Image (cartoon, rainbow, N blue to C red):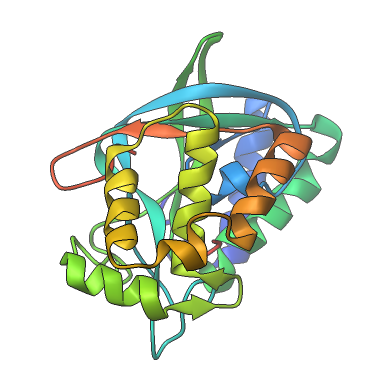
Amino acid sequence: MSGCCARDPDAMLALLRAECSARGDVWVFGYASLIWRPEFDAAEHRPALVRGWHRALRMRSQINRGTPQQPGLVFALMPGGACRGFVYRMRPEAADAELERLWGREMVGGGIYDPRFLPCATPQGTVPALTFTLSRRSEHYTGRLPDEQVLAILRHARGRYGSTLEYLAATACALRERGVHDREIERLMRLAARAGLVERAVDQPPATRRCGKRSESRSASVSTSTSTPASSTGTPTAG
């Protein structure tokens, strides 16, 4: 369904609902903020591997983790490599309402992401899961930024949900708590530590404190991924 309906969000949501209805169970793949800031109560969750995509902190955020004057960064699922995360099965009786709420979070104003169903390998078998991906052709894709520029963003970018640094630290926390090692995220955290930013946002930022409790109580989640050259082993702007 990626790119359909000239990115009319209502038409895209209608198509998504029809596709989900035809599929039966509705699964969603989480790879960053959905791990520690879930949007719905999952009936079931499983560790999952998506091949052909990887997590990267390369999506510009001008609302949730930054502003138009000082854009921030959020993670996106990009082509190439592989990504370990979690899939969440929506409760059938609440799926329609949960889909609408999730859509409103991830696809504001028609959205930046390209939503698609991807095969997710789990210990119980492969399931098709709704996944929010980003095209390298998107104007919101930053490409690989120099470390100096990343540090400037980590120092200064802040949006309605908090700072980019808090967002990065919350994701790192969620992975560490579950024994997941993401080389690129850990590299970025070391970069922030060397710049003296850890005291403000790495040890226990507000978003990180929420991540441990909310993800466990609402859907008990986790994520990882493998790396591609110059990218993470590892949103809307949702953040």
Which residue is outermost to the bottom? 69
Q: Residue at x 65, y 63 (%)?
A: 104
Q: Quadrant of the C terminus?
A: bottom right
Residue 111 appears in the rendering: no
Q: Nearer the viewer, residue 84 or 109?
A: 84
How many marks do you count on the picture? 0
Q: Nearer the viewer, residue 199 or 175?
A: 199
Q: Is residue 172 left or right of residue 196?
A: right
Q: Residue at x 60, y 77 (%)?
A: 160
Q: Is residue 181 left or right of residue 94?
A: left
Q: Residue at x 44, y 56 (%)?
A: 168
76 versus 35 height, above or below? below
61 versus 177 height, above or below? below
Question: Residue 1 appears at what percent x and percent y?
Answer: 46, 47
40 versus 63 height, above or below? above
Q: Which corner quadrant of the image does residue 105 belong to?
A: bottom right
Question: Residue 137 appears at what percent x and percent y?
Answer: 23, 62
Q: Nearer the viewer, residue 44 or 231?
A: 231
Residue 76 appears in the rendering: yes
Q: Residue at x 27, y 68 (%)?
A: 150
Which residue is outermost to the top? 124
